[in-house]
Structure formats: C-alpha cells, structure tokens
Image (cartoon, grey):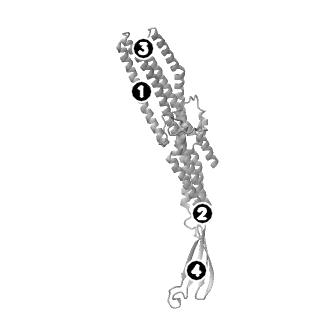
Amino acid sequence: MHKVMCLIAVILYSFLLSKIEAQNSNSNYLTIEIAVSNAIEYNPELQTLLKNIDASKAIKLQSGLIPNPEFGIDAENIFGSGDYSGFKGSEITAFLSQDISLARKISKLENVAGMDVSIAEWDYESKRLEIITNIRSAFTRALATQKLIEKNNELIETSNELIMNLKARVKAGKISPAEVSRSQIILNSLQIEINRLKADYDSDIFELMTLINNPNLLFESLNGELKYIDKLPDYDSLYVKLENNPNLKRFESEYNKQKAVISYEKSKATPDLTISAGYRRLIEVNVNTFVLGASMPLPIFDRNQGSIQEAHIRLDQKTKEFETIKNRFTLRLNLLYKRFGTLLITFEKLKNESIPDAEEAFKIIKEGNLVGRFTILDVLDAQRTLFEIENQYLNTLGSINAIVVEIEGLTVNNIN
C-alpha cells in the first residue's frame, strides 16, 4: 500500500518541474510550479487531513492494546452478629482477573483501524490532487487572459499611433475630421474590451490567490506559456488510467476495511473468556487459601448476527459507491475528450487558415493605403479583424490547455 501511495505522490508531482526555483515575497512574477508548491504547503484542508492521518494512527495503536487486568478485594461475613461480629468470621479475598479475547479479536480490530489509516491517506492524496488541478486550471485561465490583455494592448498602442497620424493629416487639411472620429470609435471599443479582460484577470488572480492561501506571496504578473497540444492519448488508454485517481484508488482500502470489519464482527460471535486468580484469608480458622475462576457468556441468543449482516451490506454499498464515482469520472472524461477534439479543429482552422488570411488581408490593405487605394480606416478595421482572430486563437488555445489540465487531474497522468 505504501508503495502505491508513493507512486501516486510521484505522479502528482510530475506536474511540477524537477527543480523549483525559490521565489522571494517581492518577486515580480509567479510560475505555475511555485503556485502549486505554495498551495500544497499552506492549504488548511491538507493540514487538517494530515492531522486526521495522525489521529487514525493513534486509534490503530489503541485498538491493538490488550485490556488491562483488574484487581479487586472481597470481604465476606463481616459486621454481623454473634460469632460473625466485626471481622471474627470474615473471609477476605484479593484477586486479579483478566479478560482474554478469543478468535483473534484484537488483531482483527487493529486490522480495521489500519485500513482507516490507509483511507485517511487516500483522502489526503485526493484533496492534494484536487488542489493541484484547481491551481493549474486557475493559473491557465489567468495566463490566457493576461496574454489576451498583452495582445490587445499592442493593438491599442498601434491604433493610437494611427490616430495621431490621422490628427496630423487633419491639421494639414488632407482628410476630414470625421475620419478621426470614426477611428476613435474603434479605439474606444478596443478599450472597453481591455477593461473587460482586466476585470476577468482580476477575478482569475483573486481565485488563484485564494487557492494558494499565502498572503506573503506577492507578484506582478504570471510567467508561463500556453502549450500547443495537437493530440491526446487514445481514449481507451486514458480510461484505464482513471484507476490511478485517488478517489477511486481509496476504494481498495474501503473494500479491505469492510472485509476486515466482516471478519471482526464474525469473531465477536465467539465470547471472550474471563479468568481470575486470588488469595483468600479465612480469619475464623486462621487459614490461607487460593481461589481460581473462569467465566464466559453463553452465545445462545446474541451471536452478533445483526452486525455481521450490516457489515456485508456495507461492503455491497461500497461497491455501488465505487461504480457511481467511476461512472461520473468516465462521463466527464468522455465529454472533455470530445470537447478537445472540437476545439482542436477550431484551433487548426484558426492557425492554418484564418490567421494567415487575415495577415495577408492586413498586409494588402496596409500597402494599398500607401498608394491611396484604401483609407486609414480600412487599415484599422483590417488590423482589428486580425487581432480579433488572434484573440480567438488565444482563447481556444487557453481552453485546450484547461481541458488537458482537467484530464490530467482525472487520470493522474502527465500529457506531453
């Protein structure tokens, strides 16, 4: 079990670079590796789950302890009347008794507690995978928005230069002031889009910082690239890798626990034995004796039938829970896989057709403007069209990266 747990941990951290550079609190950029590292270190839910693991280990320790022996003293025939007044005819017995668990109850209960430790460890791995996936998704969205802002700022800067040239030409009397007004309308629409993107970016960064939960981590921008991924592994291989997900792997421990519970409940049908031994003083005849005793409940009515039946039902219940989660993950994987295919077609069309065509159109109109064939507004419009297509390209690339991140989270598998 520990080997499997270590393997899952290695796969989870394969999302990170093998070597993470240290980042000071006043660094001007944030990488996805540092974001994940900080989130794992500072997330309070993970700290709580670590405490739960420690508590489960303590419970396991306690469950394996043998019951303490019991010491007692009995005094009989005291404070009576006649020959039995005071302690004259008394019998005083000092004894030790010990409960002895039969049918290996203690070891079986300890085995149940050991499975609880394993389940607690899988709960930790599940939450850690969830945090890694959420951080990577939030970072990818914010990075895509940041790149869109940078791209649109380039367009606004270029448009401002063109408007300045227009104003100069208006002063020279070469064109109408209406040309400047129409160009300003285009620039204003671009500025509105920039403001919307900045609001989206602020929201994405807020979500990212909330997930990281480290107020001392300060940065000015994100540092990273959106990957171009032209294909996924075949669906069947990804489906098989769903079994690596800690939310499913934990059911191995769940099954083992319920089987251990069944074994323990069956052992409880065998009653425990209590033995005792002691020393007895017969004061009246001045004699010392020893006493021995043993007792055991008779399993006539209660043979723990109900608890044994419940344990079997709980095992069946875990099977249904596993199937429910597996079906949900399968459906999500199927939807993501199909969505990736659709986005990839769109991405390839933008990359190989739309952007080259828009670049060529912009080049022709820009060159034609120099010889008077097109107006400066035509240049601005062609440039805006090119940037809108490039924005769509970045949005699609960001969506592809987000889908890949989620698929990696489902399958615990790094897709190159």
Mark 1 surroundings: few (<14), some (14-19) or many (≥20) residues within 10 A: some
Q: In this view, does 329 lie to the left or right of 377?
A: right
Secondary element under disc 4, as helix, strand or loop, is strand
Answer whether labels 4 and 1 touch (C-beta < 8 Å): no
The image's mark for residue 135 is none
- Name the residue nearer the viewer: 218 or 44: 218
Secondary element under disc 3, as helix, strand or loop, is helix
Earlier in the chain: of badge 1 and badge 2, it is: 2
Instruction: State the residue position of label 1.
Output: 193
Numbered marks: total? 4
Residue 140 visible? The answer is: yes
Instruction: State the residue position of label 2.
Output: 65
- Percent position of residue 91, x then y: 57, 84
Q: Distance between the residues labelled 4 and 1?
A: 93 Å
- Name the residue nearer the viewer: 190 or 398: 190
Earlier in the chain: of badge 4 and badge 2, it is: 2
The image's mark for residue 93 is 4
Discs 3/1, front: 3
Secondary element under disc 2, as helix, strand or loop, is loop
Question: Please, what is the three-letter code of the amino acid marked with disc 4?
Answer: Thr
